Image: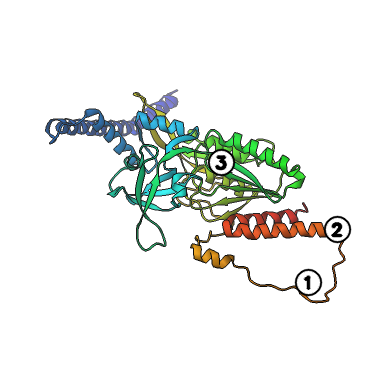
């Protein structure tokens, strides 16, 4: 009993010796925080009383909140009621603006990706462009939300943005007419015997659009046995809803992890797994990415790459591997806060590194009109059939018809290389995989 009592007493002493300094340290930390908050209150009151012009207290507090959030990383920030409402509209697929996804880098607005068939894309804005001025006024020193506000305006109005582009010696101005942006999340079409699925964004419509479009394309081709595979085009897709990225990936996997998220709180991480059922039953896949493929696009590409379900072709993706949680606040505003990083099934963090393609294929720069005309001029060619007295081929009509179809597909592929070299390359790989698999 004495030994036990001695053990209990020793345990109490040790606990007191450890806990005492910890409690004191926590109290000191709390005291420091309250002192800083008192300092904030002092500064706030001094500004209200002494600033050269009268200030709006609500705007001042909102700016302080936004400054606190934007100091964390480029993707955290405060959403005033109007911006929060606009964000919810955008996830439904229709809104007014230019049609670009942007971030902040080195004090300037960087284009993550222009959206397909929008004013920005039609005006020639490209992923990786830096916007330095809006209507002649510099964006240096503005927050991302302030810069975006500068670019907003009535539908039909003109905006002049000054662009700095890698490979161009001087900045140049681009005129864009604002318009209502109607995003078609997924477009599906047949290229020969291959299905091309173009995913432009991950909003509420992405998974339903992909499911319906892919089903229709397979039926149009005459069934799964008639297609060589699928090209999933994620180029210039700036991302969107994590839930939609998971459902799109799940459409092509039978099992296994899709992605996982890990944050500061150990038990708050999540793991997302695929359910049984592959929409194309193991047919070959190629995923196209580029520097404008970000966030949710990288989740899809990284998961399909790690599971060896698809060959990833193109150029390295943007590298946004963080997850933002939108937290509604009092007053109808919201806080966009980075709460975790996401990881591919193999445990890779994409943050700042991106997804590296299995096969790097650069998209050639657009050629000037004179160069296109020169390239389009056919070169004279001769073959055995042109020789006088040459023997005729003894193929049957069916064999000749099959050969003509193969030749037609090859000529279409050649034309496609002039329009979209990366996509043509992806289709060539897909057909090679299909031939290798005996389909």
Image coords of residue 268 (percent x, y): 48, 33
Choose between 436 and 95: the one closer to the eye. Answer: 95
Does label 1 or label 3 sit earlier along the sequence?
3
Q: Position of residue 353 (x, y in %)?
A: 47, 52
Question: To which residue does mark 1 refer?
Answer: 385
Q: Which residue is mark 3?
A: 259
Please, is residue 197 above or below residue 3 in the view? below
Which residue in the protein does label 2 denote? 397
Image quadrant in which the N terminus is located: top left
Callout 2: few (<14), some (14-19), or many (20+) C-alpha neighbours within 10 Å? Answer: few
Q: Gap between marks 1 and 3, in whole Å?
A: 57 Å
Residue at 41% across, 32% down? 86
Near mark 1 (Cα within 10 A), the count class, few <14, some 14-19 or many ≥20, is: few
Image: 148 above or below 419: above
Whether residue 264 is visible to the viewer of this picture, yes or no, is: no
Query: Residues under labels 3 and 2: Cα distance?
Result: 52 Å
| Foreground residue among 94 and 332 | 94
Label 1: element kind? helix
Looking at this view, is 321 or 129 the one in front?
129
């Amino acid at each position: 009993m004495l030994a036990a009592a001695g053990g209990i007493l020793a345990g109490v002493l040790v606990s007191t010796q450890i806990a005492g300094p910890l409690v004191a340290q926590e109290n000191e930390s709390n005291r420091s925080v309250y002192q800083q908050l008192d300092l904030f209150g002092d500064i706030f009151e001094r500004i209200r009383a002494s600033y050269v012009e009268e200030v709006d207290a609500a705007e001042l507090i909102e700016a302080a909140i936004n400054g606190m959030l934007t100091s964390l990383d480029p993707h955290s920030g405060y959403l005033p009621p109007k911006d929060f409402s606009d964000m919810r509209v955008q996830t439904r697929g229709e809104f007014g603006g230019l049609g670009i996804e942007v971030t902040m880098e080195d004090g300037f607005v960087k284009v993550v990706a222009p959206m397909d068939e929008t004013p920005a894309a039609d005006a020639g804005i490209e992923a990786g462009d830096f916007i330095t001025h809006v209507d002649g006024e510099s964006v240096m020193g503005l927050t991302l939300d302030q810069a975006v506000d500068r670019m907003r305006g009535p539908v039909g109005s003109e905006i002049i943005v000054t662009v700095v582009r890698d490979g161009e010696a001087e900045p140049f101005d681009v005129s864009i007419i604002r318009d209502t942006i109607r995003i078609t999340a997924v477009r599906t079409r047949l290229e020969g015997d291959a299905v091309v699925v173009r995913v432009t964004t991950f909003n509420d419509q992405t998974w339903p659009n992909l499911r319906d479009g892919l089903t229709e394309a397979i039926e149009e081709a005459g069934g799964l046995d008639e297609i060589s595979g699928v090209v999933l085009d994620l180029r210039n897709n700036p991302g969107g809803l994590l839930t939609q990225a998971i459902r799109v990936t799940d459409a092509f996997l039978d099992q296994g992890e899709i992605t996982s998220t890990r944050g500061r709180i150990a038990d708050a991480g999540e793991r997302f797994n695929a359910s049984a059922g592959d929409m194309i039953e193991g047919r070959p896949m190629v995923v196209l990415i580029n520097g404008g493929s970000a966030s949710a696009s990288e989740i899809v590409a990284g998961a399909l790459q790690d599971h060896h379900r698809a060959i990833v072709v193109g150029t390295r993706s943007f590298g946004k591997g963080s997850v933002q949680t939108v937290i509604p606040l009092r007053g109808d505003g919201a806080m966009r806060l980075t709460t975790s990083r996401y990881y591919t099934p193999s445990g890779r963090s994409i943050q700042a590194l991106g997804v590296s393609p299995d096969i790097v294929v650069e998209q050639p720069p657009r050629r000037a009109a004179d160069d296109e005309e020169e390239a389009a001029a056919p070169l004279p060619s001769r073959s055995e059939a042109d020789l006088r007295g040459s023997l005729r081929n003894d193929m049957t009509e069916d064999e000749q018809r099959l050969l003509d179809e193969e030749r037609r597909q090859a000529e279409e592929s050649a034309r496609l290389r002039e329009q979209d070299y990366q996509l043509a390359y992806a289709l060539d790989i897909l057909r090679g995989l299909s031939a290798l698999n005996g389909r």
